[in-house]
Image: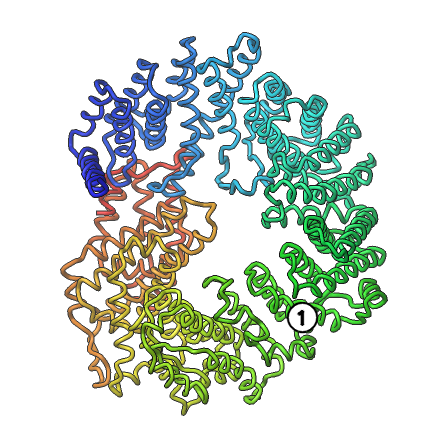
Amino acid sequence: MRQVMPVCGQEAEKTLIQFASSPDCLNKCQLLLERGNSPYAQLLAATTLTKLVSRPNITLPLEQRVDIRNYVLNYLAAHPKLENFVSQALVQLFARITKQGWFDVSKESYVFRNVIDDIKQFLNTGSTHHMMMGVQLLSQLVCEMNQAEASRSLSKHRKIASSFRDNQLFEIFQMACNLLKSAYNMIKTINFSDMEQHGLLTHTLQLVLNCLTYDFIGTATDESADDLCTVQIPTNWRSVFLDGSTLQLFFDLYSALPSSLSPMAVSCLVQMASVRRSLFNNAERAKFLNQLVLGVKGILENPQGLSDPSNYHEFCRLLARLKSNYQLGELVKVDNYPEVIKLIAEFTVTSLRMWQFAPNSVHYLLSLWQRMVAPVPYVKASEPHLLETYTPEVTKAYITSRLDSVAMVIREGLDDPLDDQGMVHQQLDQLSTIGRYEYKKTCTLLVQLFDESAQRYQEALSQSVRHNITVSVEEGRLAWLVYIIGAVIGGRVSFASTEEHDEMDGELVCRVLQLMNLTDSRLAQGGCEKLDLALLSFFEQFRKIYVGDQVQKTSKVYRRLSDMLGLNDESMVLSVFIRKIITNLKYWGGSEAIISKTLQLLNDLSVGYSSVRKLVKLDAVQFMLNNHTSEHFPFLGVNNVQSQMNDMRCRTMFYTALGRLLMVELGEDEERFERFMVPLTAETLCQPVTFYFFFRLLGAFETLGTLMSQGDQNVARSEEAKRQLIGLARDLRGVAFAFNTKVSYMMLFEWIALELWYPDPAVTTPVLKLFAELAQNRSQRLQFDVSSPNGILLFREISKVIVGYGVGICFSMLKFALCGNYVNFGVFRLYGDDALDSALSTFIKMLLSISQNDLLDYPKLSQSYYALLECLAQDHMTFISNLEPQVFLYLMTTISEGLTALVSSIELPVLHKTRIADTMVCTGCCATLDNIITYLFKRLTRKQKKPSPSQPQDSEAFLRILEMHPEVLQQMLSTVLNIIMFEDCRNQWSMSRPLLGLILLNEEYFSKLRENLISGQPPDKQAAMARCFENLMAGVDRTLLIKNRDRFTQNLSVFRRDINDSMKTPGGTTSTIPPSTMNDMMS
């Protein structure tokens, strides 16, 4: 059966593909809709039609698309009993085909813009079902217009979305509001248990919400940044928002609708509360805010509906928007402000105490209070804000509710909020500002609660019969208190601090350090992981505020530390940090969370200028530099069965920090460097390592290499052996990363050389990353002496590793080596060394094993590949010109794909990192193509000089390939020109560099392309388009000299601007190129 099912699935998929690609597919889809008995057949027809009209390169005739659209509307009207998924698929088809044809013109009219007239026929029937279907059509259309798609560039999407916004959206919003007003007026007659009546209200509320969440100005706000959202309502919508009945309608709907619908009404209020400030003048804004706050007051006075989690969540969002969009000076002037702020405070306190109910909503409440107290020092309003009265109550409620939750979590086995580190740190970041306001009250409360809990903890530990639950409860409470103390200390940057506040910080710090001394003394018998994580969080906050180059060391904090704990200066405080770090590394080797955060703290300390110089003078730091072995730091041991293989990544961070500490006083002291490396050598020698690999190192590693070469391959693949190699590679990579000067790097380079074979990615990845780090010429540290062969030796070893190993990291490694400027590659051919040829040949073999889709689908792979390709095109064009025809064409195809990477990625604007990566890929492809075109142009326009015997011959096959396949460069010319003219081109300068060479090499094709583009314009715009092309080449010679290129680049900037201006219609929108012309361009 298992063998039959995949075969059946493949056959079914093949059949569906044939169905969708058949010439009479449209007729078949219509027959399925008309005569199909199964809803799944109807669904197939609808989805197939959607795919047909969505194809990027093939456009159905206009008449056919109009017929499909009209057929869908008639079909939905005539078939009221369709399954929901079928009707939704047809609604999606209607929306898609309407958007695709938004600018299509027939008989001087836009044939797809009569949307509202068509939908009114559904709304005016009086049938609940038809009204629901009409609203659903509008709702889906608004969504479709607002959503970018992969087959359309962002600039074209914005043109359509903007046109829809200006011509249709406001009227749709008004229609939806009128429907809701009618529904509210007859609310008592509505049967909410009736699916159609309930569905009509659902879709109408969703339509309003879709209109309010429309991307009006093309900002594409990230939905995760909810609290920062501003709704950019167009100015012509002002009348709706100035009319108080619109806002009141949704407050009334919240009160009248059942809990299945009311959350959507509050969601609409959230968006209305977020309209841009500039929509109103001061008086209008004050009136609108007053009505908004009055509605909020009404909800708080009658909170029954807030028992529903969805209502509660949306209401918390609404409260947060009050302050994110309005100033405190405006809020205090609203009617009944004292009553409102009191109600909000009581609601917040109650919500915080109910910590299990809708925990994800707490963020919005804390955000409100954080934003309320932050601007207090700058408020000039004469009205009292009363925050000094209510903020301490909110702070107290949060702290006590977290402490009270501990006992319930432990005794009832509930999910511990402390386990969600992301949520904890987010809330503490907000509390840091809230708690610093009226800080004396916050500090007094924390001292009281801490002393009480610490006393109970000590009493529980001292009892002869220990009650584990009591100890666990107090450890949990102390963990919360330590987290909160660290947060409020970190909040010192939020307000102007006083000496009194610093003294309060000192009181809290002393208590935490005393608790740390107590817990550390018990680690041999076992400790509390959550409490130690809290201590690390505290240390991180304390370090940011009171340790570093910009900190005033005479503050009252240090005075208090001196009086209570004898810590007289920063060096003594740093010794406490280091002692805690060493203790954690010694006792918490089995906790990846503690080890990683401890090493992050050590890493942060090793970066500061003054503090790191004080650190290296501490005995504890010198101990770490001389004794970094598993005996003292168990997490370094390969036999640590508690940790997973991935946990060994933290070793790199450990040795990076140690390397930085060593660098402070290292200078040219080779003996000191040797002493530092002894633990690494000894740690390796003390293990029964048996690998089939050979370490050519100094001194003891030579003995180790002989030992390993005699091992059994089966034993070599053991877990311990893998850990040995992984750990060593990660350690050395950390040291190499820290050694960013020539002197220190040369010490390491002369100490190590490595050759290995191992087929497990868990082993090879860290080793390859080590080699990539060694190959990278960071800060110009790879500057070998004139008489030194080390640069060539390093490249030879890199070549061997590349020949033996994998793809992505090897691409980066080869790129670093080729671009590092520490190797003269002509030496290899001169002396018959095949290291360069072997590395480049292996690169080609690896490349051919990767599909083109994978090159762009995996960002790290694509960035390393295109960066390497750019390097090859810049310095090794002879190698590229001698490639086999199929290989060269493959390279050119990947370049063509890379040129369009940015265009396709723009459709996902929230993925900021992805867009940056694709910009780098596209820019790199432009540089690569420019180098290839320049090389080709020179070969064709001047006689080839006679090469020296040591140089490789340029292949004539390179020229013959392009002569046999002229479409390769023509396609790229079309692509680049299309992007510059019609897309949202973010790297215009880079695009301009290869474009001139492409035009000069394809002058006849460029002329045809130009004529097609001109003839594709309306008659009244053809002359302007022709002038644009004439100006593009004005003053440009048939050379690729730098001055000529720069002149062309300047012309291109003017060309792009003039093209955009010439294509604008009188209404301000932009006309589009007919599909036939676009197809001609890309043919």
Q: Quadrant of residue 546?
A: bottom right
Kind of residue at disc 1: Ile
Callout 1: few (<14), some (14-19), or many (20+) C-alpha neighbours within 10 Å? many
Q: Residue 787 placed where, x, y %?
A: 40, 92
Work out whether residue 960 or residue 1035 is closer to the camera in this orientation and state it: 960
Q: Position of residue 646 (x, y in %)?
A: 46, 62
- Relative horizontal placement of residue 184, taking residue 965 as reference (left or right): right
Where 360 sits versus 131, above or below?
A: below
Q: Nearer the viewer, residue 1053 or 390?
A: 390
Does residue 994 appear left or right of residue 340 in this picture? Answer: left
State the residue at coordinates (23%, 51%): 1007
Q: How is the image coloured?
A: rainbow
- Observer-nearest of 1053 and 857: 857
- Is residue 996 visible from the viewing direction of this image? yes
Q: Image quarter for residue 353?
A: top right
Q: Which residue in the structure is indicated by mark 1?
A: 578
Q: In the image, 406: left or right of 861?
A: right
